[in-house]
């Protein structure tokens, strides 16, 4: 997760971030400007709790802001996302689908599903929201961990894969529904939903005329324009060291960024050790098993937070060498990869990150 460093007072650096909504486990400390004046400009901060964790918004005040009552509007926007995509809300559309119901889909679900399918296609199935049952049996989903056998993995993988899911529009009911080839199928948007949340809420902010802002939701960031000093936003990346649970305690790099989404995925906070083996929360949908490689974290900078969110997960699935090869094909995306051993960290950064990097 990143560390935002605009001018102003510092918030408590040991505030816990509980990432119930996202399978991505990383963390930030955020240092915000509260009522900062950049010349004639005034920047405000709104901090709060949402989606099982925290959110932080820094933005330039605009004349029409009062028409929107931002604190109340933020509550409404977060609630809309949760009622559609959160697996922790038992009344949400995704929860009802996973219980075997057939609810009408809203535009948020449809848009996030289509984004997920696009990434699934471009990653050869290495990013797959239908892998939800695999996360469940390994204890990284919505159920307790089970005894793992190859037979169990094989049986689950027989009904995973986004090629088995589609959206059907019923012209009579004038409504859309999710169609499963196998009723045992479940979906989990954890690897894209908080990035999508940033994109959705920031779209609403821009409708209110707000052009300069940084929004962080549970670690995922989308920022536009400039901070109170008229500069790009500064974002710090934590060292991916096992046990580094205090955001900002050990920062690997600081990057300047604007008009982009930024998300870090890592295996250093959400894992367990059994019989001397470390099992991370990053599951390869093509094998059904947690990945084992020396890539410790992947920070992706992309045009949207949803894209950064999804591809950060993808890079953690495929590992360092394939990640480097992939990034060489994407001019629209930059990344900082931290790899190696816990006591011997190494960095791979794309040219775009090298140009933005302050530390």
Image (spheres, rainbow, N blue to C red):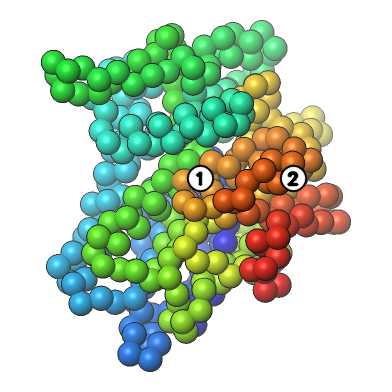
Quadrant of the drawing holding the C terminus: bottom right
Q: Residue at x 68, y 30 (%)?
A: 290
Residue at 71% in and 46% down: 328
Q: Is residue 316 visible?
A: no
Q: How far apart are marks 2 and 1 (CA)?
A: 17 Å
- Residue 191 spot, x, y in % from top left: 51, 39
Badge 1: residue crowd in 10 Å (few <14, some 14–19, many ≥20): many
Is 254 placed left or right of 307 in the picture? right
Check the image and report above or below for 81 versus 243. above
Q: Is residue 305 visible?
A: yes
Crowd tier of the residue under label 2, counting other residues whose Cα lies within 10 Å: few below 14, some 14–19, many 20 or above: some
Query: Which quadrant, please, contains the N terminus?
Result: bottom right
Q: Regarding mark 2 in the picture, which secondary structure is present there?
A: helix
Name the residue at 78% across, 57% down: 347
Q: Relative to 25, does residue 86 appear above or below in the rendering?
A: above
> Mark 2 highlights which residue?
324
Residue 33 falls in which quadrant of the image?
bottom left
Q: On the picture, is 334 further left or further right than 233?
A: right
138, 348: nearer the viewer: 348
Element at label 1: helix
Q: Please provide percent x and percent y for residue 350.
A: 70, 56
Q: Which mark is residue 307?
A: 1
**First of labels 2, 1 by sequence position:** 1
Q: Where is residue 87 in the image (x, y as percent from the top left)?
A: 40, 33
Residue closer to the observer: 55 or 300:
300
Q: Where is residue 71 in the image (x, y as percent from the top left)?
A: 25, 64
């Amino acid at each position: 997760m990143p560390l935002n460093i605009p001018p102003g007072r510092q918030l408590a650096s040991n505030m816990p971030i509980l990432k119930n909504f996202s399978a991505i486990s990383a963390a930030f400390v955020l240092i915000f400007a509260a009522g900062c004046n950049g010349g004639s400009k005034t920047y405000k901060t709104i901090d709060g709790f949402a989606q099982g964790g925290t959110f932080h918004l820094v933005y330039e005040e605009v004349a029409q802001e009062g028409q929107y009552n931002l604190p109340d509007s933020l509550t409404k926007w977060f609630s809309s996302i949760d009622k559609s995509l959160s697996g922790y809300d038992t009344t949400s559309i995704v929860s009802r689908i996973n219980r075997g119901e057939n609810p009408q889909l809203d535009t948020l679900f449809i848009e996030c599903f289509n984004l997920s399918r696009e990434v699934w296609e471009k990653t050869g199935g290495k990013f797959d929201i239908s892998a939800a049952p695999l996360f469940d049996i390994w204890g990284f989903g919505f159920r307790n961990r089970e005894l793992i056998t190859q037979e169990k993995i094989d049986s689950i993988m027989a009904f995973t894969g986004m090629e088995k899911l589609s959206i059907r529009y019923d012209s009579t009911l004038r409504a859309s529904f999710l169609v499963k080839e196998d009723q045992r199928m479940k979906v989990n948007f954890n690897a894209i939903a908080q990035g999508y949340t940033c994109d959705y809420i920031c779209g609403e902010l821009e409708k209110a005329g707000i052009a300069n802002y940084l929004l962080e939701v549970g670690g995922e960031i989308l920022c536009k324009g400039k901070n109170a000093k008229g500069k790009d936003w500064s974002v710090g990346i934590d060292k991916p060291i096992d046990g580094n649970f205090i955001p900002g305690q050990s920062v690997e790099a600081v990057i300047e960024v604007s008009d982009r989404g930024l998300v870090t995925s890592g295996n250093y906070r959400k894992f367990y050790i059994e019989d001397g083996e470390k099992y991370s929360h990053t599951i390869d949908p093509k094998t059904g098993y947690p990945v084992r490689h020396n890539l410790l974290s992947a920070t992706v900078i992309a045009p949207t937070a949803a894209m950064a969110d999804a591809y950060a997960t993808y890079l953690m699935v495929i590992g360092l060498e394939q990640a480097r090869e992939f990034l060489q094909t994407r001019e629209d995306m930059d990344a900082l990869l931290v790899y190696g051993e816990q006591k011997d960290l190494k960095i791979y950064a794309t040219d775009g990150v090298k140009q933005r990097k302050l530390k």
